[in-house]
Image: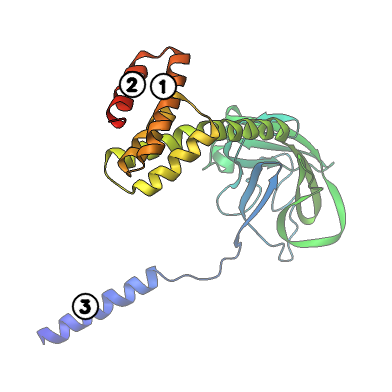
Amino acid sequence: MLKRTKLFLSLFTFLSFGMNAQELPQPSPYSEVMQRVGLTDVTVKYSRPGVKDRIIFGDLEPFDQVWRTGANSSTKIEFSTTATIGGTKVEAGTYSIMSMPNEAGNWKVFINTDLGVQEGSYDAAKNVAEIEVKAIKTDDKVETMSFWFANVKTGSADLMFAWENTMWSIPIEVNYKEMAVKNIEEAIADAKRAFRVYNSSARYNYDNDLDLNQALEWSKKSVEMDEQFWNVYTLSLIQNKLGMKKEALATAKRSLELSEKADYQPYIKMNKENIANWSK
């Protein structure tokens, strides 16, 4: 009897878990649409309700009342960088899209910081943008609410909305030129710093008795990119450790020459000592 009870409880637990974990098709399925505009990723995440033989605007969604612009949770829009939407500059981040349908087609769209906003909790003070759009009537009925991007250019695109017989769009612009110049400058700076990275990597291998041949390669590359007394000195140390006495001596003399030109006494002293010792 006890065994049967335990078996029943185990089966009940399994079935309960299965029912709780059950996933079924949703009446308003989740969707995402993403578009790169210039160097900015713009993503809209929303649930897509259907018309289902209903009158949508003016009935299901009343005119002149705020609406979550979708089903289930509020519709979200995410900008990977600062962007301008409907003429208003918005910082990088994720926002809710709320809207207010209008019978004459003069809709208002609100970009709001409250990601959990619903019609009953909407707070206009949390808007970062309030955009007036002109909604137009479409000839063909759009059964399932849709967002997409159109007129995509290097630095701009239009965010499109359509449902039932209504469509509107909002222009999005990004300052891709400024970002591109910044990326170029950073890449150039990285290239300029690369010789330092090669030298420090070579010196790390040298100091820790790691792969000296790799250290030699890195050290040579550093010197080839930008010859300085300190990276030439590193090269001389590696060459000497590898038994390349002739090359090490010549490199040390070059490091001494550069050190004297820079009037950097510590390296002048170290190079003179190495030259004296390696010349014996």
| Badge 1 or badge 2: first in the primary sequence | 1
Please say whether residue 235 is visible from this viewpoint.
yes
Circle 3 or circle 1, nearest the eye: 1
Q: Secondary structure at mark 3?
A: helix
28, above or below 199, in the image: below
Residue 49: x, y in percent?
65, 59
The amino acid on which the numbered mark 2 sits, given as a three-letter code, is Lys
User: Please, is residue 132 above or below residue 139 in the view?
Assistant: above
**Residue underneath mark 3:** 9
Residue 119 x %, y %: 59, 42
Upstream in sequence: badge 2 or badge 3: 3
Residue type (three-letter) at the residue carrying disc 3: Leu
Q: Please report the residue visible at 61 percent of the width from the left and 54 percent of the height from the top.
A: 71
Q: Which residue bears the numbered disc 2?
A: 272
Q: Answer yes or no: do the residues labelled 1 and 2 have beta carbons within 8 Å?
A: yes
Q: Is residue 32 left or right of residue 2?
A: right
In this orientation, which residue lies closer to the viewer: 83 or 201? 201
Q: Where residue 212 sits in the image (x, y, percent)?
A: 34, 46
Is 41 situated above or below 183? below
Camera-nearest residue between 195 and 85 = 195
Q: Mark 3 or mark 1, which has the lower sequence index?
A: 3
Dot 2: within a 10 Å radius of its alpha carbon, few (fewer than 14), some, or many (20 or more) residues?
some
Report if residue 190 is visible in the image. Answer: no
- SS at mark 1? helix
Q: Residues within 10 Å of mark 3 (few under 14, many from 20)?
A: few
Estimate the x, y position of residue 152 in percent, counting from the top left.
Answer: 78, 47
How far is mark 1 from mark 2, CA to CA?
7 Å
SS at badge 2:
helix
In the picture of the structure, the residue carrying the numbered disc 1 is 256
Q: What's the residue at 40%, 35% (across, down)? A: 235
Query: Mark 2 or 3, which is nearer the eye?
Result: 2
Distance of label 3 from label 1 (alpha carbons)? 84 Å
